[in-house]
Amino acid sequence: MTMMSDEPISSDRSGKSPPKAALWLGYAGLIPFAACALAVVVFREDLFLQETAGRALLAYGAVILSFLGGAHWGRALYAPNTRLQTRDFVLSVLPSIFGWSCLLLPLVSAGVLLLILGYIWQVYVDLNAMRQNILPRWFGRLRVQLTAGATLFLLIGGAALL
C-alpha cells in the first residue's frame, strides 16, 4: 500500500518542456482518431462499416473531451477560494456533458462535427488557464497541437459521413 506524500504539489508552472510521458501518451492518443477517420473514409462503400467507424470516432472523441476536463477538476482541488473552486469544478464537468450530448444526436456526422466545437472551446479554456499561470506553459502548447490533430481527424471523419 502506498501512502500519499505530505509534500505540496510543485508550484513551478513555468516549465517549458513537457514530461516525456505527456508527449508520448498525448500523441499516442491521436492514433485512434486517425484510425477511425481513415476507416470512415475507406469504408465509404459499406454504409454499415462506415457508420460503425463513425460511431467509434464519435465515442472516442467524446471520451477524450471528457478526459480533458480532468485537468480543471485537479486544479479545483487546490483553488485558493470558493469562487475559483466552483468555477473550476464547473469547467471540469462541461466537457463530459457536451461530449455525452454529442453521442445522443441521431446523425453521427452531426455529433462528430459538433464535437469539434467542444475541442475548440476546451483548448480556449486551457490556454486561458495557462495565461493565468494556473497550468504550465508546456501544457498549453501541447494542448494546441493535440487539439489540432484531433479536430483534423474529426473533420475528416465527419465530412466523409455527410
Image (cartoon, grey):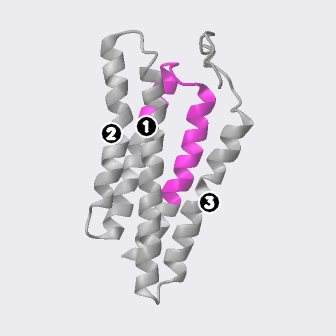
In three-dimensional space, the C-alpha distance between marks 1 and 2, rounded to whole angstroms, equals 7 Å
Is 126 contained in the magenta span?
Answer: yes
The residue that label 3 is drawn on is 31
Could you tell me if residue 160 is visible in this image? no
Relative to 107, does residue 20 appear above or below in the rendering? above
Q: What is the residue that sits farthest to the front in this orientation?
A: 1
- At x 54%, y 81%, the residue is 42
What's under tag 2, amino acid-wise? Leu
Residue 36 screen position, x and y as percent: 53, 68
Viewer-proximal residue, 116 or 68? 68
Give the percent coordinates (x, y) of residue 146.
57, 47
Number of numbered tags placed on the structure image: 3
Q: Quadrant of residue 55?
A: bottom left
Which contiguous range is marked in magenta?
124-152
Residue 74: image x %, image y %? 48, 26
Side of 86 where 21 appears, left or right: right
Q: Type of residue at label 1?
A: Gly
Q: Is residue 101 above or below residue 122?
A: below
Q: Secondary structure at mark 3?
A: helix
Asked if marks 1 and 2 touch (Cβ < 8 Å), the reply is yes
Q: Quadrant of residue 80?
A: top left
Circle on res. 111: none
Q: Which mark is residue 69?
A: 1
Tell me what residue is drawn at x 32 percent, y 52 percent: 100
- 138 inside magenta stretch: yes
**Of callouts 1 and 2, the N-terminal one:** 1
Q: Which residue is mark 2?
A: 94
Q: Quadrant of residue 11?
A: top right
Taking the spot 46% from the left edge, 66% from the top edge, the residue there is 56
Of label 2 and label 3, which has the lower sequence position?
Answer: 3
